[in-house]
Amino acid sequence: MGRSQETFNKRDKEKKRLKKKQDKLQKKEERKTTDTGKSFEDMFAYVDENGNLSSTPPDPKSKTAVKMEDIQISIARQADIDPADLIRKGTVAFFNDSKGYGFIKDHESQESIFVHINGLLDRVKENDKVTFETERGQKGLNAIKVKLIPKE
């Protein structure tokens, strides 16, 4: 006589699955018969003149009219930056000609700013005084348009 291939665990899982399916169908039927949901009007929320939520609509007599031209949907325009303000002064702290990069120490902020050989307008070496502009690079500020300040 052969044994059944179905183990106790398999039968138990099948019973749980069927029970879950029955419960789901029962809940579905209950939802159809009972109307516990809120109406659309009950879900409305209103904002009063102080910015607080309320369930009552605002008084239409206290409504103020706003002209379409008065609405601004943009940020305030900033004043144009003077190109002379963008030019910084600094000293070449390190420059490697063979690798083509170095660092400039800014005179005002004392921060080191990366410079690549492609950003040079004049040939530079260590301890040269330079003027430069900066741009945002992948890892921080990069110096561009680097020019030597003529020695006096």
Image (cartoon, rainbow, N blue to C red):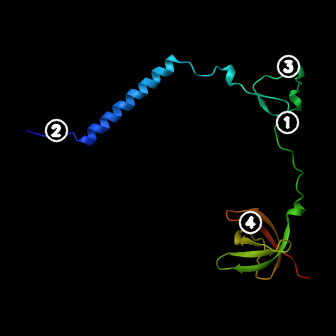
Percent position of residue 19, x then y? 36, 31
Tell us which disc is closer to us: 4 or 1.
1
The answer to whether 135 is drawn above or below residue 47 in the figure is: below
Q: Nearer the viewer, residue 74 or 82?
A: 74
Label 4 crowd (10 A; few <14 / some 14-19 / many >=20): some
The amino acid at mark 2 is Ser
Disc 3 residue crowd, few under 14, some 14–19, many 20+, Cα 10 Å: few
Secondary structure under the numbered disc 3 in the rendered image: helix
Numbered disc 4: secondary structure: strand
**In-front residue for pair 62/117:** 62
Residue 27 percent location from the top left of the image: 46, 25
For label 2, the SS is loop
**Alpha carbon distance from label 4 to label 3:** 56 Å
- Which amino acid lies under the numbered mark 4 shown in the image of this protein? Leu
Task: Please name the residue shown 26% across and 37% down the image.
Answer: 11
SS at mark 1 in the image: loop
**Amino acid at the residue labelled 1:** Gln
Cα–Cα span, label 4 and label 1: 34 Å
Indicate which disc residue 60 carries.
3
Drawn side of residue 1 relative to residue 114, left or right: left
Res. 4 mark:
2
Residue that label 1 marks: 72
What residue is shown with label 4? 141
Residues at marks 2 and 3, CA–CA distance in whole angstroms: 77 Å
Vertical side of 87 occupied by 151: above or below: below
Query: Quick check: 127 left or right of 15?
Result: right
Classify residue 37 as left or right of residue 130.
Answer: left
